Image: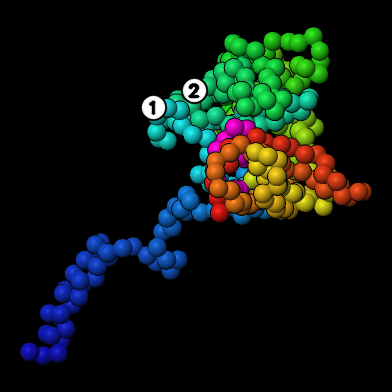
Amino acid sequence: MSRRGVASAIAPVLVAALLGTGCGGPRSGALGPAPTAAPSNVAPSNATPSSAPPSGRPDPTSTPPSDPPRAPTTTPPAPAGTTARDTVTVELWFVRAGQLVPTRRARPATVATSRLALTELAAGPTAAEAATGLTTLVPAGVEVTRITDGLATLRVPSADDPAQRRLREAQVVWTLTQFPTVRQVRVDDAAPVDRTDYADLLPPIVVTGPIPGERVSTPLVVTGTADVFEATVSVRVLDAAGREVATGFGTASCGSGCRGGYRVEVGWRTVREQKGTVEVYEVSARDGTRINTMAVPVLLAPGG
């Protein structure tokens, strides 16, 4: 057979092989294979807040995605008779000494998360939370009438005291804007508002984890936001006798005039399960004393 004949016979085979490879094998090009979703369990950095607001605006009070990783040690247990897949965790903002303080609830899953959150706000704090001074100003029956283009509309009963009314509205706004479908809230046909309108109601240090009454184990990741001197946040853990069993400190992503997220990890050695307290505070630049302390009662698991 001539060379031209051999080439003619081989060409169809090569074409078929190339076509087979292109259709059956993995596709890639100059940019490589198509990207896949990032693993959900990758721990974010501690440089930015973790409860970032759905609006995309900087939220000085949000929890760092650095925040957690919210370790299993700081996750509220699911109600009896349910599994993690049956529950939803909502963040609730209560009031203490005229300021907003967050906590969390794990409740049976529902598509009506805004209604669930408002119901929990009206129900008020748990016994452990109430023991720390938390209370609610939100009455029963407050419901969202509609959510359109990120704007939730609802009516909130008025209060005689303007300061109390503002705190009540702040509870609702901060709680509802945790959901990605809500960026702003309109109360009683007033102008839409968001978290930034009530940022002045936050204490210098906000603790988002652990929550009051939670059982925690070592190492414990303490998270939240702070506006403190040189952005330095200090943590100590006290046992049932009030003895200091762990200390640590970290740096918020912003401080001294701005609010940033922090994440501090601490560990302790105890031989038995007992009540304890996690204190998050600022060291005074003037005299070195602890100031702006936020105390969270917890149940300490044994650690070593």
Number of the front mark, 1 or 2: 1
* Count of numbered circles in the view: 2
Quarter assignment of residue 87: top left
Q: Which residue is mark 1?
A: 81
Determine crowd level at label 1: few under 14, some 14-19, many 20+ residues with C-alpha closer than 10 A.
few
- At mark 2, the secondary structure is loop
**On screen, residue 22 above or below 38:** below
State the residue at coordinates (65%, 35%). Answer: 297
The C terminus, quarter of image: bottom right
Q: Which residues are magenta?
A: 209-221
The N terminus, quarter of image: bottom left
Identify which amino acid the numbered label 2 is placed on: Ala
State the residue at coordinates (70%, 31%). Answer: 101
Identify which amino acid the numbered label 1 is placed on: Gly
Q: Which residue is mark 2?
A: 112
Q: Position of residue 119 (x, y in %)?
A: 56, 18
Task: Tell me if residue 37 can be seen.
Answer: yes
